[in-house]
Amino acid sequence: MTYHGAVKVGGSPDVRELAHLIITKVAVGPYENNAYLLRCRATDEQLLIDAAAEAPILLETVGERLATVVTTHQHHDHWAALAEVVAATGARTAAGRIDAPGIPVPTDLLLDDGDVVRVGQVELTVRHLVGHTPGAIVLIYDDPQGHPHVFTGDCLFPGGPGRTTQPEDFKSLMEGLEAKVFALPDEAWIYPGHGNDTTLGAERPQLQEWWARGW
């Protein structure tokens, strides 16, 4: 079945099968957060991006083993189920170094820009973006047999960057997106923290409009 990335709270997950990685997307919680389970084909090791809410749903999706939970940023709706998921699985926790103090579950692995997070034999590159929060991160999997896959948290959605409240925050976020995300090819697939997926090619034409509009 073709992956589409359109999931709803209470509905079925959507699964994308790549050559080296299987991505399962599920929607949870009152804010319709997306959580992403990544499984290395070679080792079956698993990594969860954002234990956002509804721990029983996440644990059912994970199954028996989970190595790591990465939290993309410190906002409550992205870690509400983290403590319960970690208690049930023994998974290590990871988050951006600057946002980690704002997450009430201790962070085992503090992440900086350019770091690599591994799930089995698969490597994810960390990019730190300032604006939505001071220490938000995105994770990039550069598929050697395809295009990049980018897990953006709340920093980029279909139609624009994550909402910020101050002009300087918007400027910082836009500069970071341009330098660290939009340098990727149009085919790069975007997996946001809420809502449907998109691609950089679909979002690129709106770049100047975002700058003009601000937030």
Image (cartoon, rainbow, N blue to C red):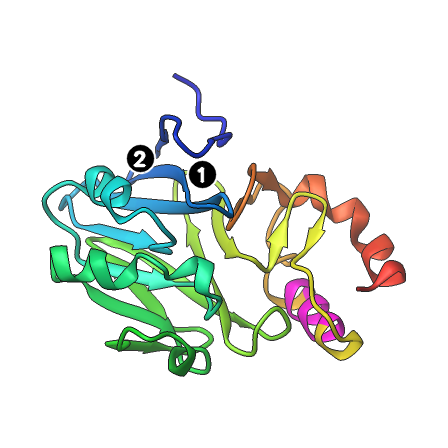
Task: Say which element carries label 2.
Answer: loop
Three-letter code, disc 2:
Ala
Residue at 34% x, 37% y: name it: 24
Question: Is residue 32 visible in this depiction of the protein?
Answer: yes
Three-letter code, disc 1:
Gly
| Residue 143 point in image, percent of width and height | 40, 45
Q: Which residue is mark 2?
A: 19
- The boundaries of the magenta stretch are 170-178
Q: Quadrant of the C terminus?
A: bottom right
Q: Residue furthest front?
A: 30
The numbered mark, 2 or 1, whose residue comes first in the sequence reads 2
Residue at 47% x, 67% y: name it: 73
The rendered magenta stretch, by its main secondary structure, is classed as: helix
The question of residue 174 being in magenta is answered with: yes
The one nearer the camera, 186 or 67, is 67
Q: CA distance from mark 2 to mark 1?
A: 9 Å
| Residue 55 point in image, percent of width and height | 26, 49
Residue 126 occupies quadrant: bottom left
Residue 88 occupies quadrant: bottom left
Badge 1: residue crowd in 10 Å (few <14, some 14–19, many ≥20): few
Residue at 13% x, 46% y: name it: 43
Q: Quadrant of the N terminus?
A: top left
Task: Say which element carries label 1.
Answer: loop
Q: Residue furthest right?
A: 212
Q: Confirm or deny contact between disc 2 and disc 1 (CB under 8 A).
A: yes
On residue 146, the disc is 1
